Amino acid sequence: MPSMLDAVVVGAGPNGLTAAVELARRGFSVAVYEAMDTIGGGARTEELTLPGFRHDPCSAVHPLGIGSPAFAAMPLARHGLEWLHPELPLAHPFPDGTAAVLSRSVGQSAMSLGAGDAGAYRRLVAPYTGHWDTLAADFLRTPWDGLPRDPYRLARFGLTALQPATWVSRRFEGERARGLFAGLAAHAIAPTSGFATAGIALCFALAAHEKGWPVPRGGSQAISDALASYLREQGGEIHTGTEVKRLDELPPARAYIFDTSPTALAKIADLGQAYQHYRYGASAFKIDYALSGPMPWTAKEARVAGTVHLGPTAGEIETALSAAVAGVAPRVPFLITSQPTVIDPSRAPAGKHVLWAYGHVPNGWEGDATEAVERQLERFAPGFRDLVLARAVAGPPQLAHRNANYVGGDIACGAFSGLQTLIRPKLARVPYATAHPSVFICSSATPPGPGVHGMSGHHAAKAVWRRLRATG
């Protein structure tokens, strides 16, 4: 190792690894330090329940991963990353046994909403279909970082995206379309009546049509492992099992990049109250299941979908999210579930399956929502409980212990509300820079926010190499 590194990255999640790769491939010397014994951050895979059942403790389905401009520019397939596409990206079932779907086909998706709303859905997505690559590059960044590639389309997208999902839902007549759209918006982990939640819904819908909602073969760990393999190929180093509590514990470097929460960064780098106004949002309550057979969904579409949303109406979804944000555990949670074994049987022993499910609870909540979650699963898959071989339950304290970035169990590393929706972690021309000239932040607390896409790491690396070039 050289006496003075160009950059040290703290945290080996997708953003930290992406930042390290971006610098290493440009000839900078880079080392990554990770507190856990294994790499991955929010993209890892573990046997949480029984031997042979491979679960993703956090992220599982990756529309923004396969659609990431940063990942697209790397030879990750050569390093073992293979995307698997289920027959349907998403099913949104209803109590009557039918389902709305999000398909690779706009037409199939539109028709699943009912004749009255098929045209409205087509009109909503039509201006953007076929333009994912330029649109993604434009909205997966800091809005004021240079000129957009397609200003007209981005402006048009922005006019819709900045609205609450509840406003955009008024374009639809029926509960099928409104429920599907609300479920997509709920990935923001904020009430669907909130500012810019329509943008989250529209982004996920377009990603499904343009790129799909795939899972990586073998689990989300494959993304992290591919990034790490490519980093090592470029000469970068990774050190695991090394918790960093103070900046002076790290080797000398020209730049330090933190894939951590703003709270942790301020403490480690002695930045005082730099992020005192940064707020964390509602938590997830996550359960991983080992199942003896496939989920017995009432809706046939759900049986072939990689992701299934459980919360039929927009009103029910809004109630559940509003309760969690207000500090009340929802009685009927909205669930986001993933069943990777419908497309990747390697994730479980022969004939067996894994199910990944989470609802929303207040930040830091210490209660047990298992019964509420399983009531909701049984509502749409009667007999589900009979298939459960084992479960691994993680509420806010367990999520925060598993990943220090998830403060209070907030898997988005920051609330999606108010000005913080667009300005994270604080107002700055370069949000990746800090008051310390050699310290930067690249976690999902920075633009463009949460998701396994590496774009926060990509943009932070760009800020770092500009600084390194300027200082010689």
Image (cartoon, rainbow, N blue to C red):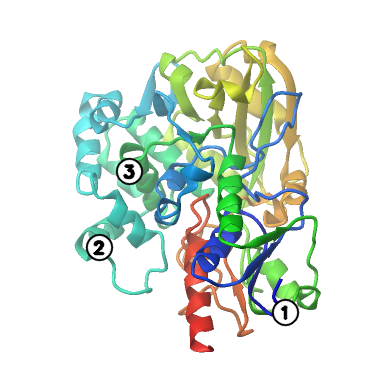
What amino acid does circle 1 point to?
Ser
Across and down, in percent, residue 40 comes to 65, 49
According to the picture, the residue beneath numbered tag 2 turns out to be 155
Residue for point 55% across, 34% down: 334
Across and down, in percent, residue 109 comes to 30, 29
- The tag earlier along the polypeptide, 1 or 2, is 1
According to the picture, the residue beneath numbered tag 1 turns out to be 3
Residue for point 27% across, 30% down: 105
Compared to residue 298, the image places residue 189 above or below, namely below
Across and down, in percent, residue 449 comes to 50, 58
According to the picture, the residue beneath numbered tag 3 turns out to be 206
Marks 3 and 2 sit apart, C-alpha to C-alpha, by 16 Å
Q: 10 Å neighbourhood of mark 3: few (<14), some, or many (≥20)?
A: many
Mark yes or no: residue 250 visible: yes
| For residue 404, side relative to residue 123 (left or right) | right
Secondary-structure class at tag 3: helix
Residue toward you, 378 or 288: 288
Secondary-structure class at tag 1: loop
What amino acid does circle 2 point to?
Ala
Label pair 3/1, CB-CB below 8 angstroms:
no
